[in-house]
């Protein structure tokens, strides 16, 4: 949603390019073709027509052909509003008496798709198909050439009048109109009076006027053809030059209308007409005017931009200060959006249901920006943002799409072609950027020269006066009182105790952060469950170890997730007795990637007892023989010496070690989730955690294996046939979104069913390296990750080798797409039931755990998950199955090591 909002805003801001005069760098009298590499060719014909051909990597068959014409709404004069869109329809229309299906019938077996669209700067005509047949490509180029050379008739233009009007029926869009109004008031440019389409002009427009617009702007020197995919570069180049070289050379050079821009100093508060945007939505815009043209070829500048953007997106999770708002903050830069020297800055969207909430969020947002300017990003969040930028740089979801976007961007500015940066070069640039580079750029963006505006729709005069008073303060040069800053840069880098002046808290109804002087951070999330299942959940998180470090409490217990339940005894037994009648009671130890936690959930009426219970755990120094151990199923609670789980052993000493490890932390945080009044929570926090001090000593070393425990459990790590966990491991880089996570869950259930029938072994699903892997662990987080599915065996070497033959057949059939509809139905039903069984409190807990661990607050709405699940079709499964199950990796795990 954050990316969607940014795209909508920039749909209004991108036309700033119109102020840049067209730089005609094409001086050649004859055709020129430049060989960028063996796999890429760019060319300029004598008539000004440009092209680029690239053979993309991989063994796929996809081919993309895109004709880009620089004839968008920028090119319209006052009496031509909407003509660019109308011409796009007429150009894309098949010849009279022929359907679009007929024109693409030669690609019938190649899954063709055709789209056309108009923006403020361009018209795009895109044809995609799956084929390695050169003749298919030739005929596809013929079809695009027909569009580039078409001569529009009155009949063709008139026939597209009604289709254009039908498309306009959903316009104007409230968000688009609001953004355009914001830009109009800020920049004072007549361009923003333009609209993508005008119903009046379309109804009354004469075909000869539309044809005149087409003849004026659809010229070869304003066109570029992009061909990318499974193509022969040299052969394709010849075919392009043979056809498009015949287009007549223009005799007159055209210059688009110039819309002068300036930044308005006043008013800082922009009152948007409710007729334009009736929903109470506030938009905070911080811009730098005239930042100077940035070298778009500079990979270093690109790398700084990419890191800032990812770090900003992470920080946006902390902008939901009020429960009545849905806020986001995003950074944009001239490099990525080709705004060039016009503007760069930060945009915060405050979607409030009330003006009071918007005022609170406005003040909090400005304070957060002030903190960012004063302190910059922390080292840990900088590194996380850089890692995420690396993932985006290395993963190519569709090379054809990325190629088209990059070259179309070049074309819009009239720049000469440049080679696309290789992934290696991008990674090198990201690696070379330092934290100070990023913070220097942030300081410039949020500096005193920047312009701060607020656009408010449906706000009354008093609210706007209050908002203007806040804006006049702007981004202060002096450090604000830290107690008023709700955002903490990084849990792994806690704010020093000396700087914490008071409780940092937020408005009722949202996440509240309490700071104990010298003690742990407490985050309270008020549940919206009402009286249905009022539970309270507390967890103590330890982030004292670095990301990626193994948090094993013993070498033979690598995967200790929620498998050890424990209770204090002796003086603390009253807590267990009180909870014994509480059906909601759960207590567990959790080990995750980069954190460890103690977790307890109780009924609402036992909330205070839960606080006492957590305090007892945090302060207890009980010897190990006073700890009760429970097996993985939560049954047979007692002081059993050890329990077996997946071929590994665990005993009471593991619980003691885990407890010692978690409670002697350098940076602990306590999470409270429940349907509790804020005042009550604050009182309980003060009463039970107010005197706690976080240890600043080095974390306790991970304990070594106790030989007596190993002997008691017959765990002898010797011999070639050691019984250990062996597994098939599958993983692949895929886009991290809810749909893909659901697909992997379904594929995992299908594989699980096949394994249980044939091998009688356990199959665990681990997706994006989440701990556990059930649907409950499938949160919503944008980005790129590794889809991972593994089949675990408790077997010796001989048994494993025997099982591999059967397993190969299972996974090979999945990779080939041999999946029955009944299997899909059964697996989907299992996934759906798991989604339905999730409680709201549990969902909020997982979301907040994501906030603590990943610094990104995801949305975990079960109804949304079910909608996505129901929309998945078999083709979705087959595509991802081939990618994930293509080649298994055999892993043997013994003594906590993978080999």
Image: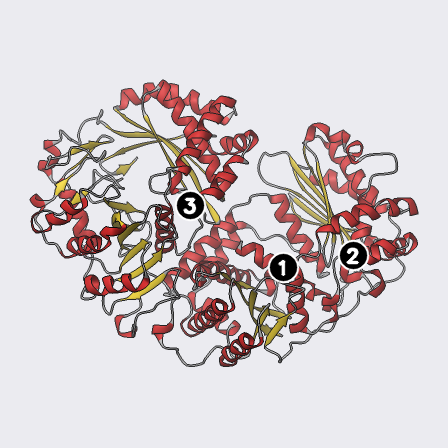
- Residue 772 in the image: above or below residue 173: above
Report crowding for label 2: few under 14, some 14 to 19, many 20 or more residues within 10 A (C-alpha).
many
- Residue 291 screen position, x and y as percent: 60, 73
- Residue 621 screen position, x and y as percent: 10, 54
- Residue 383 in the image: above or below residue 439: above
Circle on res. 175: 1
The one of 239 and 367 positioned closer to us in this rendering: 367
The answer to whether one can see residue 13 in this image is: no
Of label 2 and label 3, which has the lower sequence position?
2
Q: Are marks 3 and 1 in contact (CB under 8 Å)?
A: no
Q: Are marks 2 and 1 in contact (CB under 8 Å)?
A: no
Residue located 48% across and 30% down the image: 886
Q: What residue is shown with label 3?
A: 779
Of label 3 and label 1, which has the lower sequence position?
1
Q: What residue is shown with label 2?
A: 71
Q: Quadrant of residue 774?
A: top left
The residues tagged by marks 3 and 1 sit, at their Cα atoms, a distance apart of 28 Å
| Badge nearest the viewer, 3 or 1 | 1
| Badge nearest the viewer, 2 or 1 | 1
- Residue 435 screen position, x and y as percent: 42, 66
The answer to whether one can see residue 622 in this image is: yes
| Badge nearest the viewer, 2 or 3 | 3
- Residue 70 in the image: above or below residue 764: below
- Residue 144 screen position, x and y as percent: 78, 42
Q: Quadrant of residue 695?
A: bottom left
Q: Quadrant of residue 293?
A: bottom right
Residue located 66% across and 73% down the image: 185
Of label 2 and label 1, which has the lower sequence position?
2
SS under mark 2 = loop
């Amino acid at each position: 949603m954050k990316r969607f909002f940014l795209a909508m805003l920039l749909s209004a801001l991108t036309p700033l390019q119109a102020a840049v005069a067209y730089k005609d760098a094409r001086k050649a009298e004859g055709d020129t073709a430049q060989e960028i590499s063996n796999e890429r060719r760019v060319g300029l014909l004598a008539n000004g027509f440009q092209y680029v051909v690239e053979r993309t990597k991989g063994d796929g068959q996809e081919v993309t052909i895109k004709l880009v014409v620089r004839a968008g709404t920028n090119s319209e004069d006052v009496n031509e509003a909407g003509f660019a869109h109308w011409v796009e329809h007429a150009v894309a229309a098949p010849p009279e008496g022929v359907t679009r299906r007929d024109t693409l019938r030669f690609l019938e077996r190649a899954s063709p798709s055709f789209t056309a669209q108009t923006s403020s700067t361009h018209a795009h005509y895109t044809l995609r198909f799956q084929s390695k047949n050169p003749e298919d490509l030739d005929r596809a180029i013929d079809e695009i050439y027909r569009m580039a050379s078409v001569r529009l008739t009155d009949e063709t233009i008139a026939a597209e009048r009604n289709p254009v009007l039908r498309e306009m029926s959903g316009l104007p869009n409230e968000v688009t109109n609001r953004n355009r109004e914001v830009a109009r008031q800020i920049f004072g440019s007549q361009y923003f009076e333009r609209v993508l389409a005008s119903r009046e002009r379309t109804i009354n427009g004469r075909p000869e006027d539309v044809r005149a617009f087409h003849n004026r702007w659809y010229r070869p020197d304003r066109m570029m053809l992009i061909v990318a995919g499974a193509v022969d570069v040299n052969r394709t180049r010849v075919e392009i030059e043979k056809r498009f070289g015949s287009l007549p050379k223009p005799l007159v050079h055209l210059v688009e209308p110039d819309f002068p821009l300036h930044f308005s100093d006043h008013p800082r508060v922009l009152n948007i007409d409710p007729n334009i945007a009736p929903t109470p939505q506030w938009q905070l815009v911080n811009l730098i005017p005239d930042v100077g043209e940035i070298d778009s070829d500079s990979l270093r500048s690109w790398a700084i931009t990419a890191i800032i953007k990812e770090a900003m997106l992470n920080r946006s999770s902390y902008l939901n200060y009020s429960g009545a708002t849905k806020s986001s903050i995003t950074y944009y830069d001239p490099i990525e959006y080709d705004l060039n020297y016009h503007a760069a800055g930060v945009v915060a969207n405050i979607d409030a249901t009330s003006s009071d909430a918007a005022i609170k969020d406005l003040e909090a947002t400005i304070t957060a920006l002030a903190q960012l300017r004063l302190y910059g990003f922390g080292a840990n969040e900088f590194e996380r943002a850089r890692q995420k930028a690396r993932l985006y740089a290395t993963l190519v979801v569709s090379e054809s799409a990325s190629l088209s976007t990059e070259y179309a961007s070049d074309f819009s500015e009239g720049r000469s072609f440049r080679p696309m940066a290789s992934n290696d070069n991008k990674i090198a640039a990201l690696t070379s950027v330092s934290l100070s580079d990023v913070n220097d750029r942030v300081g410039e963006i949020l500096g005193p020269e920047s312009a701060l505006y607020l656009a408010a729709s449906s706000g009354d005069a008093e609210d706007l006066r209050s908002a203007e008073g806040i804006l006049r303060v702007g981004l202060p040069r002096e450090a604000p009182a830290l107690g008023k800053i709700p955002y903490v840069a990084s849990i792994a880098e806690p704010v020093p105790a000396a700087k914490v002046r008071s409780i940092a808290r937020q408005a009722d109804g949202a996440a509240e952060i309490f700071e104990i002087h010298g003690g742990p951070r407490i985050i309270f999330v008020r549940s919206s469950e009402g009286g249905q299942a009022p539970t309270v959940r507390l967890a103590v998180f330890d982030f004292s170890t670095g990301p990626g470090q193994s948090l094993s409490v013993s070498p033979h217990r690598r995967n200790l997730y929620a498998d050890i339940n424990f209770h204090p005894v002796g003086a603390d037994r009253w807590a267990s007795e009180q909870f014994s009648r509480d059906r909601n009671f759960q207590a567990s130890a959790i080990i995750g990637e980069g954190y460890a936690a103690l977790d307890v959930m109780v009924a609402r009426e036992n909330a205070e007892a839960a606080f006492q219970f957590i305090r007892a755990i945090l302060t207890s120094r009980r010897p190990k023989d006073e700890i009760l151990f429970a097996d993985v199923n939560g049954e047979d609670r007692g002081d059993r010496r050890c329990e077996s789980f997946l071929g590994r052993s665990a005993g009471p000493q593991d619980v003691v070690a885990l407890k010692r490890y978690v409670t002697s932390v350098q940076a602990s945080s306590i999470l409270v989730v429940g349907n509790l009044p804020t005042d009550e929570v604050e009182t309980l926090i003060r009463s039970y955690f107010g005197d706690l001090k976080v240890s600043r000593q080095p974390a306790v070393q991970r304990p070594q294996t106790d030989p007596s425990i190993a002997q008691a459990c017959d765990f002898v790590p010797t011999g070639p046939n050691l019984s250990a966990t062996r597994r098939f491991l599958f993983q692949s880089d895929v886009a991290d979104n809810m749909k893909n996570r659901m697909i992997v869950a379904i594929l995992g259930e299908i594989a699980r069913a096949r394994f249980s029938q044939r091998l009688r072994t356990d199959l665990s699903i681990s997706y994006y390296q989440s701990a556990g892997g059930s649907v409950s662990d499938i949160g919503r987080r944008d980005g790129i990750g590794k889809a991972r599915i593994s089949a675990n065996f408790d077997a010796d070497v001989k048994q494993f080798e025997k099982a591999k033959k059967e397993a190969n057949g299972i996974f090979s059939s999945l990779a080939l797409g041999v999946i029955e509809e009944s299997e899909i139905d059964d697996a989907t039903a299992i996934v759906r039931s798991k989604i339905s069984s999730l409680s709201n409190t549990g969902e909020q807990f997982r979301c907040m755990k994501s906030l603590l661990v990943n610094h990104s607050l995801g949305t975990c709405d079960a109804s949304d998950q079910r909608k996505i699940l129901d929309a998945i079709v078999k083709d979705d499964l087959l595509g991802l199955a081939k990618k994930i199950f293509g080649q298994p990796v055999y892993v043997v795990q013994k003594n906590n090591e993978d080999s």
